[in-house]
Amino acid sequence: MLEVAANSAASAFAAEEGGAGRVELCASLDEGGVTPSHGTVVLAREGLTIPLFVLIRPRAGDFVYDDHEIEAMLDDIAHCRALGCDGVVVGALTPDGRVDRDACGRFLDEAQGMGLTFHRAFDLVDDQAEALETLIGMGFDRVLTSGGMPGAVAGAGRIARLVTQAAARISVMPGAGIAPENIAALRDVTGAREFHASAKRRLPSAMRRTPADALGMGAGETRTDVDTVRALVAALNGEGP
């Protein structure tokens, strides 16, 4: 199954059109993703028929959060639950690189009845094997990981070990750098059953006059590409080149 990281409602709809099985909705994908706006979540929830998970991340940067940030994240989770979202994507770490049990426990309590994914904060933990057992014990449904490497291809060996360790108690979902050309091989090497990709491309600017180039504001948006999603799904189904 392919999950697509969608940075807008338009990207979410493109993901579904291309055959994705689930959307992870976020904003600021180039910074690793943060929580999308209320209007974006509402529009995506109303327009999608596939499951919608929402990234709960108050800012870019590390995953050590203070009390104010945790309160904001709890409010965002409650907001997503009230809107009928299928799940949320969360994560928090301690300064020494362990899963923040206290913060994540509060996230789990707030998200009762929703699916729970632990995001790529997992790739910054000190001990992934230990962290995986922590997430299993807490009740997470899946963990997104590149195996602690810049991309899932480079981390495939470690991902495979995590899949074996998980033994179907939690889904280990490879992500980062996944493309139609490598997704089938990653499936075969890792034994994973769910995969995460953005399938994005840069669109040309719709502006006729773009003097903003010098200001860094003239480029077109980045959006999920329907054809790339289709190619990823085809490759997973053994229909690729």
Image (spheres, grey):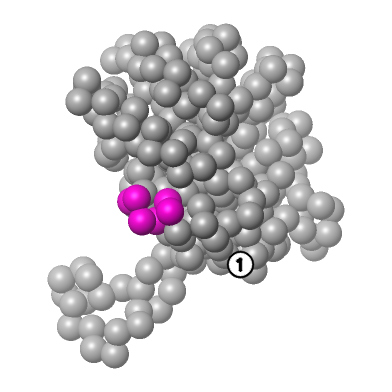
Residue 149 to residue 135: above or below: below
Callout 1 amino acid: Val
206 horizontally vs 163: left or right = left
**Does residue 81 appear in the picture of this structure?**
yes
146 horizontally vs 208: left or right = right
- Percent across and percent down for residue 219 are 31, 73
**Location of the N terminus (image quadrant):** top right
113 magenta-colored: no
- Percent across and percent down for residue 218 are 25, 75
Tag 1 secondary structure = helix
77 horizontally vs 192: left or right = left
Residue at 51%, 23% (x, y): give it. Answer: 112
Residue at 22%, 20% (x, y): give it. Answer: 67
The residue lying furthest to the right in this view is 238
- Relative to the observer, which residue lies in front, 25 or 112? 112
Residue 95 to residue 205: above or below: above
Q: Quadrant of residue 98?
A: top left
Q: For mark 1, what is the residue?
A: 226
- Percent across and percent down for residue 92 are 37, 23
Residue 191 to residue 44: above or below: above
What's drawn in magenta, residue-wise? 37-42
The residue lying furthest to the front in this view is 82
Residue at 63%, 55% (x, y): give it. Answer: 49
**Does residue 180 appear in the picture of this structure?**
no
- Percent across and percent down for residue 181 are 69, 56
41 magenta-colored: yes
